[in-house]
Amino acid sequence: MSNSGLLHIFVVMFFFSLMPSAYAQNPSGTLPQLPPGQSLGLALGITTVPNLRDVGGYKTRTGAIVARGLAYRSDTFNPMTTEDIRKLECVGLKNDYDLRTTAEAKAKPDEMPPGVHYHLLNVLADAKSAAPAELEALLHEPKKANVALGGGKIEALFMKGYREFVSLPSAKQSYRTLFLSLADREKAPGVFHCTTGKDRTGWAAAALLTLLGVSKETVMADYMRTNDYTLPQFKHVIDDFVAAGGDRAIAVAIFGVKPEYLEASFDEVEEQYGTIERYFSEALGIDAAGQKRLRDLYLGTK
């Protein structure tokens, strides 16, 4: 697996068990009315999925509003208590699209309400093997990490990974399946997620919203909202890393998101396909009619 592929997998698997659960619960039994981009997980009191959000609610450049209650983005649904699952039932999910690797899914299998259909869409299945085996050790040795990952090196790894979300054959197949499924009203509502809901999930949400006509600025703001929900979970890890001599910027680059990460995906789309529409048609095999089905469903034009 490539350096960038390992980076995504390692970070989420190694630190997932360290995430605290200190958010106030607000069980309601019904879906709350939230501004676009706000955490439905926290609103429902499901502390393990703070990055669970409705993709809808955003305004497009033509003034249309992306429909709510059809597609959700999230972090992993594990661990989930019986009460968490009960709260999640009010979302009415029909399908769960897991963008993680087989190993990630096996280590932390999704825990869902009865009747939700599970689909594993391994975005990084075709990433080549040549990963830095010492990454875990580096994160335990902050001063060495400063040398190996500082000076923009860690950001470069993430940017390479985001380009792979566009270029890898497995990514193309996974996102094709996801978007074709999301275009089917009978399969809604559905949720797509990776482990922390920030990278593979981040590109999926950005690509969909861009195709629907949401502005680049709004798409980026939605993407950056992940930091509001992810970085607090890792605060103690980041603080410990810094206290041991590590560069805070390295830890923030690993556990959060940066505009340049998502820009790398968009740059790859522009270089290889020119437009988001051609990315959908040429890379994903979703033609103009398929793209229209997505717009008709999410923009209420049919």
Image (cartoon, helix red, strand yellow):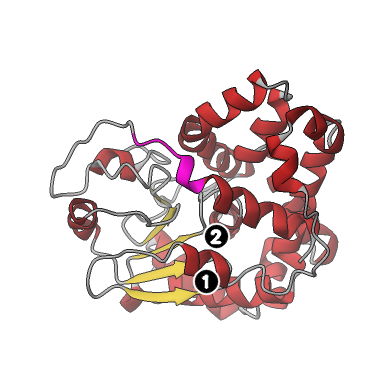
Is residue 98 highlighted in magenta?
no
Q: 100 or 74, which lies in front?
A: 100
Q: 207 or 241, which lies in front?
A: 241
Task: Name the residue: 37% across, 57% down.
Answer: 77
* Percent x, y of residue 35: 35, 37
Q: Residues within 10 Å of mark 2 (few under 14, many from 20)?
A: many
Label 2 and label 1: CA atoms lie apart by 8 Å
* Residue type, numbered disc 2: Leu
Task: Name the residue: 39% across, 42% down.
Answer: 50
* Percent x, y of residue 210: 59, 54
Q: How many marks?
A: 2
Q: Residues within 10 Å of mark 1 (few under 14, many from 20)?
A: some
Q: Is residue 282 left or right of residue 54?
A: right
**What residue is shown with label 1?**
179
Q: Quadrant of residue 255?
A: top right
Is residue 20 highlighted in magenta?
yes
Q: For the N terminus, which image quadrant?
A: bottom right
Q: Say whether disc 2 or disc 1 marks the residue closer to the N-terminus.
A: 1
Task: Name the residue: 50% across, 77% down.
Answer: 180
Labelled pair 2, 1 in contact (Cβ < 8 Å) = yes
Q: Quadrant of residue 95?
A: bottom left
The vertical placement of 150 against 69, above or below, is: above
* The magenta segment: 16-21
* Percent x, y of residue 89: 20, 60
**What residue is shown with label 2?**
208
